[in-house]
Image: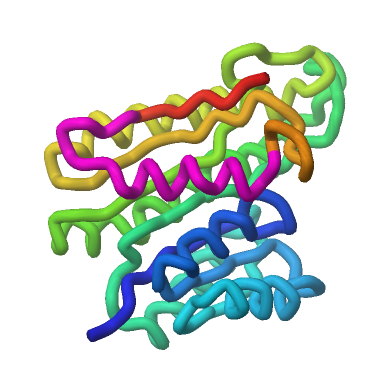
């Protein structure tokens, strides 16, 4: 019997990797999509050590819709079954006030923060609908609720991502698909209340919830 697949897009050494390891411990095959290649082998080995029966590791520039589609097609060529879980964890937004944002930079950052999340969801939704089940989880941020002047681009992106997740939740819940955002209102680092491994437990808990008791947002704050 094939193993269920969890697809983690935007894998880095923090939340993304911790979530991948958490689902690996439950016997999931894991698809990793990172924006750069330099740490992919290290991430893959870490997830394999956590117990994943199979790990697919791919790099894709999430600002390039074509690259994301290519990565997904490569994954599907190897793993025939549709993902049971999608976690979108990517973000981009250098520190800058709104008055200094360059439109072309904001568009690129919005592509990573929101549009690639939408594209990722649209890639997996048909398979989830056909199966009558699935989980879409988005890594949000406190900037969605309390924007900061010096983080204008990411504040815009996280607010839009939260709205996207809530809209998808309302649309897809009747189809058996659980959609939620984990809004992390703090700086992620080990040995703090925002330890990545502790945060990853919330992703697993959301996936485990029974329909009828589905939450659409988990807010993590100090």
Q: Is residue 105 visible?
A: no
Compared with 167, 195 (above or below) is below
How far across and down, in percent of the image, does residue 111 sit?
60, 44
Q: In which quadrant is the C terminus drawn?
A: top right
Q: Nearer the viewer, residue 14 or 98?
A: 14
Residue 123: image x %, image y %? 36, 60
Q: Is residue 151 left or right of residue 129?
A: right
Q: What scheme was used to colour the molecule?
A: rainbow
Asked if 161 appears above or below 199 in the picture, the reply is above
For the point 28% across and 42% down, the residue is 209
Residue ID at (38%, 51%)? 121
Q: Position of residue 91 (x, y in %)?
A: 67, 43
The quadrant in which residue 60 appears is bottom right
Q: How many marks?
A: 0
Q: Is residue 197 magenta?
A: yes
What are the residue bounds of the magenta stretch? 195-215
Residues 79 and 212: in front is 212
Query: Dividing the image into 4 quarters, which one contains the N terminus?
Result: bottom left
Using the rendered view, name the quadrant where residue 42 is placed: bottom right
Q: Residue 17: which quarter of the image?
A: bottom right
Tell which residue pokes out farthest to the front in this image.
Answer: 191
| Front position in the image: 121 or 105 | 121
Tell me which secondary structure the magenta stretch mostly adopts: helix
Rendered residue at 67%/73% (across/down): 46
Residue 11 seen anywhere in this rendered image of the structure: yes
């Amino acid at each position: 019997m094939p193993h269920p697949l969890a697809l983690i897009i935007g894998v880095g050494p923090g939340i993304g990797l911790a979530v991948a390891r958490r689902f690996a411990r439950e016997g999931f095959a894991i698809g990793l999509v990172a924006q750069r290649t330099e740490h992919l082998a290290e991430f893959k080995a870490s997830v394999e050590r956590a117990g994943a029966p199979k790990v697919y590791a791919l790099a894709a520039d999430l600002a390039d819709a074509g690259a994301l589609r290519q990565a997904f097609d490569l994954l599907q060529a190897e793993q025939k079954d549709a993902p049971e879980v999608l976690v979108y964890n990517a973000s981009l937004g250098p520190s800058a006030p709104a008055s200094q944002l360059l439109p072309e930079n904001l568009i690129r950052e919005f592509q990573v923060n929101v549009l690639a999340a939408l594209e990722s969801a649209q890639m997996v939704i048909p398979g989830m609908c056909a199966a009558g089940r699935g989980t879409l989880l988005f890594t949000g941020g406190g900037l969605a609720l309390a924007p900061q002047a010096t983080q204008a681009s990411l504040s815009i992106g996280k607010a839009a991502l939260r709205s996207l997740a809530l809209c998808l939740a309302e649309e897809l819940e009747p189809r058996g698909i659980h959609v939620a955002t984990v809004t992390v209102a703090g700086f992620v680092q080990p040995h703090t209340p925002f330890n990545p491994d502790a945060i990853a437990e919330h992703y697993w808990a959301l996936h485990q919830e029974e329909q009828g008791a589905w939450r659409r947002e988990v807010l993590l704050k100090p």
